Image: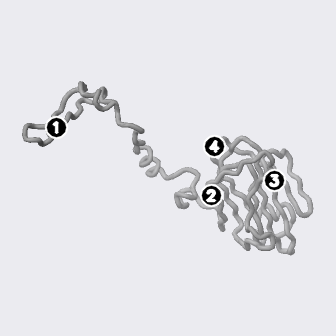
Amino acid sequence: MEIMGSNVSTTYITGPRDPKMSFGIKLPFLVLLIKNLHKYFTFEVKILDDQRFMRRFRVSNFQSKTSVKPFCTAMPMGMSPGWNQIHFNLADFTRRAYGTNYMETVRLQIHANVRIRRIYFTDRLYAEEDLPNEFRLVSKPAERKKHRDYTVPAARPPSPAKSAATTERTISPGGEPSEAATDAADTEKYY
């Protein structure tokens, strides 16, 4: 999925759809597999802490300083060219920013401009080899080899001049078609 827009603050997707609803996700690690489009991008996570306060973490690639306010923390994020795997430890950030404990994730907003491959929550950070292929930044070596050996079908058949021989159909005296291998002399019939 790709989210593009000229105004980062007004172009976004959010979940859950109903603003009064909550995800209720208690897993403390948020992982995003996203592609850097070299444009402004931000995402926002709303959490509930053990003091029953709603706190927001806003992370963006256009901000240079971290700002901690009573209910919202804004943080910069650096992204590499191409695909990135962002690990966000919600429990650690809640403890460091507010001195409270993370309880659950309430909402998630992903703003423009980004291409999303996968977003998921997890109980801990897993090694790359322990993840299913669709949750990895890079696929397994066996999968990459399989894809590399695959050749894309040509849009049209190869040129007969490049092939060793072409097939010519002739009608035998009995009226049955017969095939004879010839060189590229018969190419005018087909092209």
Name, please, the residue furthest toward the left. Answer: 174
For the residues labelled 1 and 3, the Cα–Cα distance comes to 66 Å
For the residues marked 4 and 3, what is the alpha-carbon distance in whole angstroms? 24 Å
- The spot of residue 96 in percent (x, y) is 83, 61
User: In the rendering, at what x and y percent does residue 86 appear?
Assistant: 69, 53
Residue bearing mark 3: 10
In this rendering, the label closer to the viewer, 2 or 3: 3
Q: Nearer the viewer, residue 31 or 124?
A: 31
> Badge 1 is on which residue?
179
Report whether 71 appears left or right of 180. right
Q: Is residue 128 left or right of residue 81?
A: left
Instruction: For mark 1, give the secondary structure.
Output: strand
**For the residues bearing labels 4 and 3, Cβ distance under 8 angstroms:** no
- Labels 1 & 4 near each other (Cβ < 8 A): no
Q: Amino acid at mark 2?
A: Arg
Q: Amino acid at mark 3?
A: Thr
Please name the amino acid that badge 4 sits on: Gly
The residue beneath circle 4 is 82
**Label 2 – label 3 distance at C-alpha:** 22 Å
- Disc 4, SS: strand
For marks 2 and 1 on the same chain, the one whose residue lies earlier in the sequence: 2
Tell which circle, 1 or 3, labels the residue nearer the N-terminal end: 3
Q: Are marks 2 and 4 in contact (CB under 8 Å)?
A: no
Q: Which of the marked residues, 4 or 3, is nearer the chain's N terminus? A: 3
List the residue tagged with mark 2: 118
Q: Nearer the viewer, residue 72 or 97?
A: 72
- Image point 87% across, 64% down: which residue? 98
> Are there few (<14), some (14-19), or many (20+) residues within 10 Å of tag 4?
few
Q: Nearer the viewer, mark 1 or mark 3?
A: 1
- Position of residue 139 relative to residue 90, above or below, is above
**Amino acid carrying mark 1 in the image:** Glu
Q: Quadrant of the N terminus?
A: bottom right
